[in-house]
């Protein structure tokens, strides 16, 4: 799951980014409206957290233009306290929800989860053959065997399960599991795939995570 946070207050942006990363999301941050809009138009996000008061272009403008361009990513607006006007304008412009600053982090994640549940990515249990992953409890299983996953392993497995039988390149994996500052030239992706493989496939007769030489990886039944 990949989230874009558009917020010019560095402290707030940093706090949101750290918190969401701890919850296994890949997070990109933009510090003004122009940059935020550009990232939103050029990347696939599962949800966007958009502050209204932003330098260069305000959040409402950004939101309007995204919707005009038919980008339907769910948007959670951040509004200043007592700014009823902003809230109304925001919802009119295509925001899916709003949160008044200051807010507790738990409130933010609850809202984001609700938005993602409404969207394409529900919180239903993900399955492939005998592998299952429950986003609500964050528990993974292979058959009856419980698998303990680290934050990045979880994000990787989730990405595979949402894209079975599809070859995922290292770049795609890096972009979805890490963020855009990640250097995909390193072998970190391969290292993490190996960790995940050890947990999912190692002692199993049937292997599901396959290497496509020179390209990337795929989750599928056959070699
Ligand atoms: Ca602001």
Image (spheres, grey):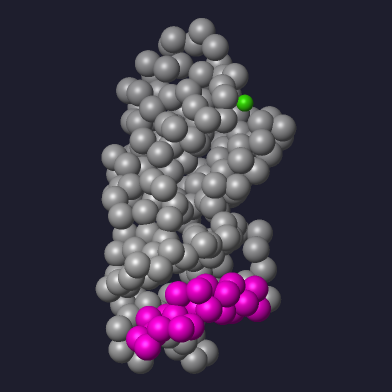
Using the rendered image of the protein, determine whether residue 163 is visible from the camera's viewpoint: no
- For image coordinates 32% across by 59% down, the residue present is 126
Q: Is residue 140 above or below residue 11?
A: below
Horizontal relation, residue 91 to residue 188: left or right = left
Where, by quadrant of the figure, is residue 180 drawn? bottom right
Residue 212 percent coordinates (x, y): 45, 88
Q: Is residue 135 magenta?
A: no
Between residue 65 and residue 155, name the one nearer to us. 155
Q: Compared to 101, does 63 lie above or below?
A: below
Q: Is residue 207 magenta?
A: yes
- Which residue does the image show at 50% across and 74% down from the upper left? 199
Quadrant in which the C terminus is drawn: bottom left
Q: Magenta segment, which residues?
A: 187-209
Asked if one can make out residue 117 in the rendered structure from this viewpoint, the answer is yes
Q: Quadrant of ligand 1?
A: top right
Measuring 37% from the left and 88% from the top, which residue is drawn there?
205
- Give the residue drawn at x 71%, y 34%: 10
Query: How far from the left and from the top, in percent, is residue 203?
Result: 46, 83
Q: Position of residue 222 (x, y in %)?
A: 31, 89
Residue 111 rendering spot, x and y as whole percentages: 42, 31
* Residue toward you, 140 or 10: 140
């Amino acid at each position: 799951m990949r989230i874009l946070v558009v917020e010019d207050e560095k402290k707030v942006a940093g706090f949101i980014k750290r918190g969401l990363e701890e919850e296994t999301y890949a997070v990109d941050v933009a510090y003004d409206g122009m940059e935020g809009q550009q990232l939103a138009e050029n990347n696939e996000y599962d949800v966007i957290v958009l502050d209204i008061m932003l330098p260069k272009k305000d959040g409402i403008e950004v939101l309007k233009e995204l919707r005009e361009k038919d980008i339907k990513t769910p948007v959670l607006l951040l509004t200043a306290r007592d700014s009823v006007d902003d809230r109304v304008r925001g919802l009119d412009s295509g925001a899916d929800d709003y949160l008044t600053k200051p807010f507790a982090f738990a409130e933010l994640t609850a809202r984001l989860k609700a938005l993602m549940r409404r969207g394409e990515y529900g919180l239903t249990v993900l399955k492939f053959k005998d592998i299952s992953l429950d986003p609500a409890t964050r528990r993974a299983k292979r058959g009856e065997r419980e698998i303990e996953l680290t934050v990045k392993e979880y994000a990787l497995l989730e990405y595979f399960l949402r894209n079975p039988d599809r070859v995922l390149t290292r770049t795609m994996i890096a972009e979805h599991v890490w963020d855009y500052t990640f250097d995909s030239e390193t072998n970190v992706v391969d290292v993490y795939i190996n960790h995940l493989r050890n947990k999912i496939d190692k002692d199993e007769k049937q292997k599901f995570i396959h290497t496509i030489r020179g390209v990337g990886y795929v989750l599928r039944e056959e070699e």
